[in-house]
Amino acid sequence: MLGSTGRRFLVVRPTLGETVLKMPRGAQVIYPKDLAAILMEADIAPGMTVLEAGVGSGALSMAMLRAGASVVGYELREDFANRARNNVESVVGADAPYRVELRDVYDGIEERGLDRVVLDLPEPWRVLPFAEVALRSGGIICAYLPTINQTSHFRQVLETSAFGMSSTLEVLHRTWHIEDRSVRPDHRMVGHTGFLTTARLLRREELGSRPGVPGPSRVEPAAPGATDAAAAEAGDARPDADGVDEATDRVWGDTTG
Ligand SMILES: C[S@@+](CC[C@H](N)C(=O)[O-])C[C@H]1O[C@@H](n2cnc3c(N)ncnc32)[C@H](O)[C@@H]1O
């Protein structure tokens, strides 16, 4: 391509990872390194039906749609829901199997026979009773959380649920500088984004009869340290596209995402 000053440019289409960091957004997006891990840990595959809450800017929706899944999204905010729909339409296409509903997932999940439930919101343990009946046996729940106290509480509540085979990880992504004989890690890296926890639905047949398994109507109390106020204080320190912390532009417990 020839620029207005006569300079020549090579133009290539952006990758999904590049698009996610530059696209219009309201809520903070999940970083590409974590999107990649979610696809693998939650085992997202063609033909699967995934319930996602909340959808925010639609970055995770795009990654799962591109992996071949059908996605039903629950989102509290209408402006975010519209943003996610627009982003998905422009990147994945208008015919993507994608539906976003304006709903609070803490009030319940309407769908049944889901393959996956994927959550990026402050109190995923409140979704467990609903996910237990909405997922098919062997289905996977996956929660992305910015703090370890939220993650620890989620793991504790999982222990009292019909889910098992829980695991938690974080992705540390270090790029390298490679130039002639100067071969070393880059000086800067993204220190922290979030923790990824997955578990599988193992004991649905016992639901309602086993003491300790929260039924669909029961809502777990908030984790100590993950109350709205404490979560807001902790902040969501996902870095922005330039690697700069955005702890102040987005806080957990604040439904603005
Ligand atoms: C960090 S954003 C999600 C970003 C999204 N994963 C992405 O990659 O673009 C969190 C979203 O959850 C939504 N949310 C919070 N609580 C919710 C709830 N109880 N039900 C549905 N959506 C909720 C917020 O409005 C916000 O849009």
Image: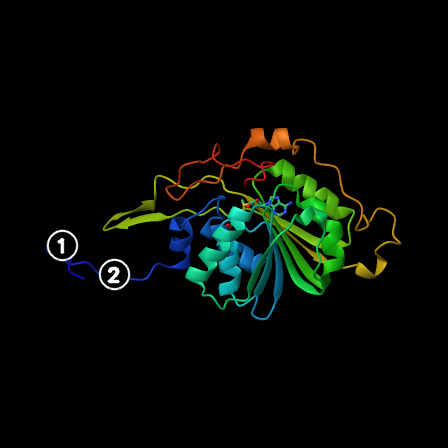
Residue ID for mark 2: 11
Quadrant in which the C terminus appears: top right
Give the residue at x 55% y 55%.
38
Q: How many marks?
A: 2
Quadrant in which the N terminus appears: bottom left
Give the residue at x 66% y 31%.
225
State the image quarter where residue 92 is shown: bottom left
Residue ID for mark 1: 4
Foreground residue, 104 or 42? 104
Looking at the picture, how far across and down is residue 15, in whole percent? Answer: 38, 59
Q: What element does badge 2 sit on?
A: loop
Observer able to see residue 15? yes
Q: What element does badge 1 sit on?
A: loop
Q: Label for residue 61?
A: none
Looking at the picture, how far across and down is residue 28, in whole percent? Answer: 48, 44
Give the residue at x 47% y 48%.
31
Looking at the picture, how far across and down is residue 91, in whole percent? Answer: 42, 61
State the image quarter where residue 219 is shown: top right
Foreground residue, 87 or 102? 102
Number of other residues with Cα within 10 Å of mark 1, as a class: few under 14, some 14 to 19, many 20 or more: few
